[in-house]
Image (spheres, rainbow, N blue to C red):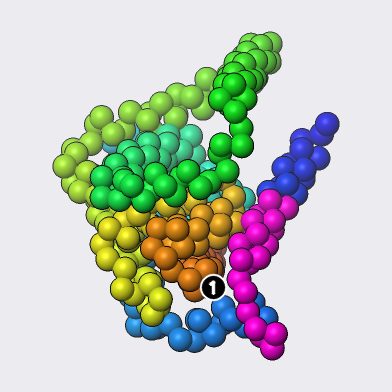
């Protein structure tokens, strides 16, 4: 099978799964005979408090700026320099690419930064891996806090998910198959790399660059500041959830514990390798609102579509504008170095 055909099949399956999950979410939305489901969602949008939604947009931009600043900090110990503005532009371009290609933004933002500041892609990618590891720790801490505050409700919610349809032996068989398949795939890659001198040289060079990026966190001059930025990023994410929840009459009365729980569910949904979490977010979050806090299903579905749509619109506008600015800066740089 050719690589192009594999990519085509992969993204066809992703699109089909995303479409199915959105359809599955909309299926629970019941409207009158004279109204369709999209009209109901639009009506909910018109009734939303736009001040809170604009506040969410401002918090989102601020969180992206601090993330870019944290990324700049990680790059500095590798011996390369990245401007804050260029880190921010590259980050936003990465978010835009993620909407079309799951996890593709991680590589594209590194490539964008290379075009702007000549930071090697392999080195910056190593710092992105560090970022993702730190984010996983933060998400883990968030989940611990959510379960500490709403243990009974969250356990009950998890039990409603269709995990029990697979027996214990079936689960073990799936895990064993995945483990063995992963080992065999790794061995195959090692054999292929060892037989090709060019490929071996490329892998060695790339790994050295990634290793430089991975060890950057150990060489930080201000580790406390890095930790503070990491906390601040996730705190701003929490505030984004809070402001959107306040924008709708159905969810406005929810308290701190509810925001934490829904934020945790939403973060897990966004981590699913689908374009921007589309589909997984639309299924999990409404179920959480209904099961945990008795929000009417129609309001829960409409809230989720607007929340996710608003986030996506911010990424599209910010990423598109960043892409245009990047193109302008690269063109200007080329014109400057012309003899």
Count of numbered circles on the image: 1
For the question of whether residue 6 can be seen, the reply is: yes
Label 1: few (<14), some or many (≥20) within 10 Å?
Answer: some
Name the foreground residue: 195 vs 247. Answer: 247
The stretch of residues the image draws in magenta is 16-35
Quarter of the image holding residue 36? Answer: bottom right
Name the foreground residue: 272 vs 334. Answer: 272
Tag 1's secondary structure? helix
66 on left or right of 121? left
175 on left or right of 150? right
Q: Residue at x 51, y 47 (%)?
A: 160
Image location (x, y in percent) of residue 41: 56, 78
For the stretch drawn in magenta, the main secondary structure is: helix
For the question of whether residue 322 can be seen, the reply is: no
Q: Residue at x 65, y 83 (%)?
A: 32
Image location (x, y in percent) of residue 276: 54, 56
Image location (x, y in percent) of residue 131: 37, 41
**Residue identified by numbered label 1:** 298
Q: Is residue 296 magenta?
A: no
Q: Is residue 20 magenta?
A: yes
Is residue 264 shown above or below 173? below
Is residue 33 shown above or below 135? below
Is residue 118 shown above or below 165? below
Image location (x, y in percent) of residue 251: 38, 72
Q: Residue at x 38, y 48 (%)?
A: 154
């Amino acid at each position: 099978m050719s690589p192009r055909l594999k990519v085509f099949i992969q993204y066809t399956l992703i699109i089909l799964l995303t479409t199915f999950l959105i359809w599955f979410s909309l299926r629970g939305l019941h409207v009158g005979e004279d109204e369709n489901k999209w009209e109901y969602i639009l009506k909910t949008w018109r009734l939303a408090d736009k001040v809170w939604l604009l506040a969410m947009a401002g918090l989102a931009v601020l969180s992206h700026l601090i993330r870019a600043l944290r990324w700049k900090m990680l790059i500095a110990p590798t011996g390369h320099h990245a401007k804050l503005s260029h880190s921010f532009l590259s980050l936003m371009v990465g978010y835009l690419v993620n909407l079309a290609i799951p996890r593709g933004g991680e590589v594209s933002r590194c490539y964008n930064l290379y075009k702007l500041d000549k930071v090697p892609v392999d080195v910056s990618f190593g710092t992105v891996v560090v970022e993702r590891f730190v984010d996983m720790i933060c998400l883990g801490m968030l989940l611990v806090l959510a379960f500490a505050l709403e243990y009974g409700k969250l356990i009950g919610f998890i039990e409603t998910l269709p995990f029990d349809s697979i027996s214990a032996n079936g689960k073990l068989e799936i895990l064993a198959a995945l483990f063995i398949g992963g080992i065999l795939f790794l061995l195959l890659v090692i054999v292929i790399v060892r037989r090709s001198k060019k490929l071996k040289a490329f892998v060695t060079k790339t790994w050295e660059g990634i290793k430089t990026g991975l060890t950057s966190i150990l060489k930080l001059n201000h580790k406390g500041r890095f930790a503070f930025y990491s906390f601040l990023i996730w705190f701003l994410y929490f505030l984004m959830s809070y402001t959107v929840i306040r924008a709708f009459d159905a969810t406005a009365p929810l308290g701190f514990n509810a925001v934490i729980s829904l934020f945790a569910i939403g973060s897990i949904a966004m981590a699913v390798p689908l374009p921007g979490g589309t589909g997984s977010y639309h299924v999990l979050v409404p179920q959480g609102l209904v099961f945990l806090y008795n929000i009417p299903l129609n309001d829960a579905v409409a809230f989720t579509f607007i929340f996710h749509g608003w986030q996506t619109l911010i990424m599209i506008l910010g990423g598109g504008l960043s892409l245009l600015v990047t193109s302008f800066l690269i063109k200007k740089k080329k014109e400057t170095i012309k003899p």
